[in-house]
Image (cartoon, grey):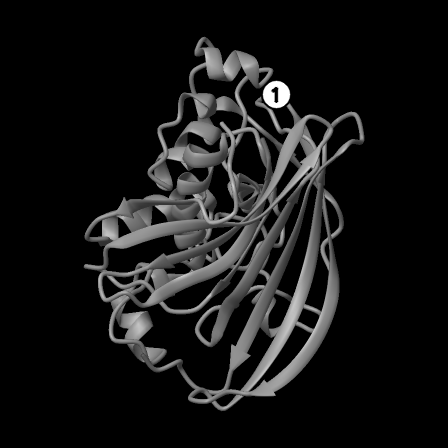
Amino acid sequence: MAEGFEFPVDRTQVMLFARSVRDINPAFWDPDHPDTKAAGGIITPPTFVQCSAHWQPDYPLDLTRPRQGPPPAHRGDAPGGGGGGLGRGLHAEQHYEYHHPIHPGDTLTVTTRPGNRWEKEGRRGGKLMFSESITEYRNQAGVLCVTATSVGVQTERAVEQ
Amino acid sequence: MKLKVGDTHEAVVVENVNRTHIVKYAGASGDFNPLHHDDTFAQKAGYPTVFAHGMLSMGLTGKMLTDWLGAANLKKYGVRFTRQVFPGDTLTAKGEVTEVQEEGGKQLVTVRVVTVNQNGESVVEGQAVAAI
């Protein structure tokens, strides 16, 4: 799995992400709002750490990112991978534990390790192959802020609606 | 705010999802899987059209939770993705308190979470814990 990488958190990214989930809570963008001050400064929406993808060197779901050398293998196709790949891979579950707030100005170190893997027969999609990946986000003081567990599933055929 | 078992909250978190909503999420999150913005690619993979990122549904549902329980109060939040969200869908996120523990002068509140589309079909199902 990926070596740890750094994810610098800035106020603009927090605002953009909050807007993308249609959230205009001032705690996520207005440093002068009383709720923000009560929270010790701007904080982040519950699923914000997904933005770390922008800083993940081998992130597989951005094949148009300009980079030197060949694009990375699709995560969903790789041994020990979690999350969805392109095409057949889908995201089955996502879980977060929040230990400590994240603020703009923090630099998070992101480390991911594989979790469990299992298979089951799907009702419509043939055999389903599940894999977990567990990601920790620690701030510049070494404090664990968020633990994220992603469960990816690979299907033999497209999932029918 | 004091909560008790059985208390509920719900909110329409997006009306009539369109490709611009989806592309905005792709840009913000960095997830540019073409299944979510390239109809040709999605159809080759067997889907009728592009569909939203599961994480967009989870993020939209998170807004319901933080509006209700407080932006700084979540301790845990997890979901299963149960159905894809396609352009045209409208999502309503619903929470119900299933457990309340008093702990250190705060309430540790467990909430069952489900977000449904306009047909009442769930798109995410899960649980959250908040300290209020």
Q: Which of the 4 image quadrants contains residue A8?
A: top right
Where does the image place residue A109, in percent across and percent down from the top left? 72, 37
Q: Quadrant of the N terminus of chain A?
A: bottom right
Residue in view at x 37 percent, y 41 percent: A21
Q: In this view, does A71 lie to the left or right of A12?
A: right
Residue in view at x 69 percent, y 51 percent: A135
Residue in view at x 46 percent, y 49 percent: B6
- Depth check: give the residue in front, A114 or A40: A40
Where does the image place residue A14, in percent across and percent down from the top left? 48, 30
- Depth check: give the residue in front, A14 or A101: A101
**Is residue B98 in view?**
yes
Where does the image place residue A12, in percent across and percent down from the top left? 45, 25
Q: Quadrant of the C terminus of chain A?
A: bottom left
User: Identity of the amino acid at label 1?
Assistant: Gly
Residue in view at x 43 percent, y 59 percent: B54
Report crowding for label 1: few under 14, some 14 to 19, many 20 or more residues within 10 A (C-alpha): few
Where does the image place residue B83, in percent across and percent down from the top left? 38, 69
Does residue B50 sit above or below A28 in this rendering? below
Q: Which of the 4 image quadrants contains residue A133?
A: bottom right
Residue, disc 1: A105
Disc 1 secondary structure class:
loop
